[in-house]
Amino acid sequence: MATEPDFRIQPDGFLTLANNSRTANLTAARAIRWTQATGWQTLNDVARANGVDTTGITFLTAETVTHDGQFIAGKAVFPTTVVTPGFKPEGYILRICDATTAAACAAFNAGQPLQPAWPSDQVASNRVFNYLEATYPQYAAPKGATSTIGSGYYFRYYAATNSYVGSLNGNVYYLVPAINDQINLLGSLSDWLAIAAAAGF
């Protein structure tokens, strides 16, 4: 029995991927995609609109996506797939170049490096740190401190304010003596990354 969409990936908010079913009947599942321009569409419809011949192909799941949204990967059924009880669907990588991903596709075609799938914790942390430096210079100065690892934290030390900002296990922390002498939880890394991304970091 189908249930509400299973939201698996939400890079930056301009594009969302989901799976429309958590049912045990995998063949009933469909990968779906949302953008501001198109709203919800099955990945099959998206592919057809971008000139992909999807005859005999069903995109069942969308499991990862490059950060710029142009490459999507997951599981699918192809014309050669033998569908029997307990079968394992085959993997796919689909490239979509439409209005949402046009700039990313142009950059890729020009030979620029492909952005990674949803950023690693360190990449995400650096984007958050850069945002915090720009937003709270009274606490995080000088700007552009080097990130390092210590005591399990990935962090930056700001000599001018004797302050720290760091991440650990998916959370962001700060130590600012001007506020108190404790290591304080600032929030989840994913939440702060969304804020930083919306601000262009």
Image (cartoon, grey):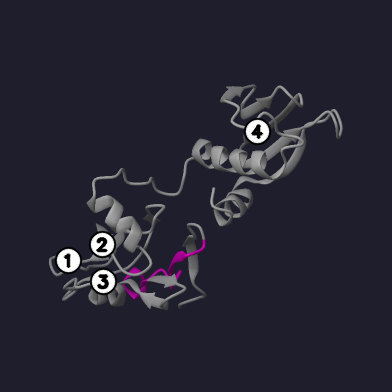
Secondary element under disc 2, as helix, strand or loop, is loop
Mark whose residue sits in front, 4 or 2: 4
Whether the residues at callouts 1 and 2 have beta carbons within 8 Å, the answer is yes
Of pointers 1 and 2, the one earlier in the residue sequence: 1
Residue position for label 2: 87
Q: Is residue 116 magenta?
A: no
Whether the residues at callouts 2 and 3 have beta carbons within 8 Å, the answer is no
Q: In the displayed structure, would residue 98 be above or below residue 164?
A: below
In the image, taking residue 106 as reference, residue 54 lies left or right, namely left
Mark whose residue sits in front, 1 or 4: 4
Residue position for label 3: 47
Q: Nearer the viewer, residue 131 or 41?
A: 131
Mark 4 crowd level (few <14, some 14–19, many ≥20, 10 Å Cα): many
Whether the residues at callouts 4 and 2 have beta carbons within 8 Å, the answer is no
Q: How far separated are the C-alphas under marks 2 and 3? A: 24 Å
Whether residue 125 is visible here, answered yes or no, is yes
Residue at the image point whose x is 21% and y is 71% from the top: 57
* Residue type at tag 3: Ala
Q: How far separated are the C-alphas under marks 1 and 4? A: 49 Å
